[in-house]
Amino acid sequence: AKAEGSNNIRFFDENMDLAARERNALAMDLRSALIRQEFELFYQKQNDTHSGEIVGFEVLLRWKHPERGYVSPVEFIPIAERSGLIVELGSWVLREACREAASWRRPLRIAVNVAPKQLATFALPAQVRSILQETGLDPHRLELEITESGIIEDQQHALNIIRQLKAIGVKIAMDDYGTGYSSLSTLQLFPFDKIKIDRAFIDGVTENRQSAAIVRSTIILAQSLDIPVLAEGVERLEHLHFLREEGCGQVQGYFYGRPEPVEMLQDIVNPPDLI
Ligand code: C2E
Ligand code: CA
Ligand code: CA
Ligand code: CA
């Protein structure tokens, strides 16, 4: 596909391969997308494994490109990360999500992804504090999902930022557990409030002995550290049964629901019988 978009100036180069040109085009479009309000937030349920009750939502960013339609975050987040735009984009996500959640009748929790670049600055705690103040959201209803790649570069800095965030009352989850370089030593060093097992391990949990063993031992580890554990990518009843059996407290995945616009979730966040 040819990379066409707005009238932005593009830095095309004869020698650039198609993939690089695509990325370049997307990077240009990303910049204007914020101004044109092409971003949307989707919400995916997180459920208690035993009762099935909804405990909160993960907030997932969507880009509705004028010509391409929905572009996956898997495609544009790395580009935004590289160009530095993720810092601005990330603060937009945070503000929008907090504003939205603060308007709900039910005080459900929201989990927002925080990119490594956002964590790398000193600005995050002050920014979170001011967004909470501005929106009126109870800090305990906000959870920030942080990946290991966000903290390995400067561990001391990351630890400092995480402590400040926790002092505000915000919860910190370790995202994509098991996919990093040294998940165990990261766990030892950082005061996480939750561990999210990556869906790469849930996928084969009922057929693959290795996946099952990894998930099982992660749950045991989390339990002995007294940290709640959530498994993502739960698509089938067998996944749920396995996780329930092994003592995993929370799940997230297509089994309970795909990420959706909040308009589709009104019965949950604003139930008519709750005034
Ligand atoms: P993630 O943080 O690991 O988020 C979970 C991803 O798994 C989401 O993909 C979600 O739609 C998908 N998922 C959930 N349940 C299932 C399931 O049962 N089966 C399958 N096959 N997939 C499932 P999504 O929305 O495409 O997001 C991809 C990644 O993009 C996220 O992975 C996260 O790393 C990043 N991302 C999304 N929104 C944001 C954001 O606002 N900020 C930052 N920094 N990153 C974001
Ligand atoms: Ca996440
Ligand atoms: Ca993941
Ligand atoms: Ca991730």
Image: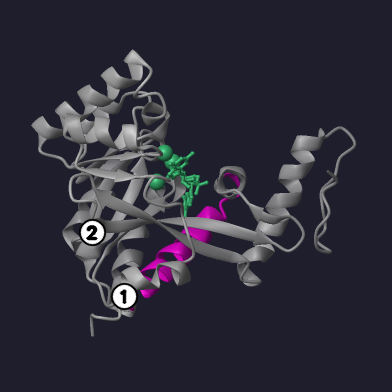
Quick one: SS at disc 1? helix
Rendered image: mark on residue 102: 1
Quick one: SS at disc 2? loop
Q: Residue at x 57, y 55 (%)?
A: 85
Is the magenta region chiefly helix, strand or loop? helix
Amino acid type, label 1? Ala
Image height check: is 35 above or below 208? below
**Mark 2 → mark 1, Cα distance in angstroms:** 15 Å
Q: Is residue 35 left or right of residue 164?
A: right
Q: Which residues are magenta?
A: 82-104
Q: For this rendering, which residue is in front, 107 or 206?
A: 206
Which residue sits furthest top? 209
Image height check: is 121 above or below 275? above
Confirm whether residue 179 shows in the render.
no
Q: Quadrant of residue 130?
A: bottom left
Which residue sits furthest front? 237
Q: Is residue 91 magenta?
A: yes
Confirm whether residue 250 shows in the render.
yes
Image spot of residue 170 (x, y percent): 23, 59
Image spot of residue 13 (x, y percent): 86, 40
Camera-side mark, 2 or 1: 1
Give the residue pinned by disc 2: 170
Image height check: is 260 above or below 210? below
Image height check: is 176 above or below 73? above
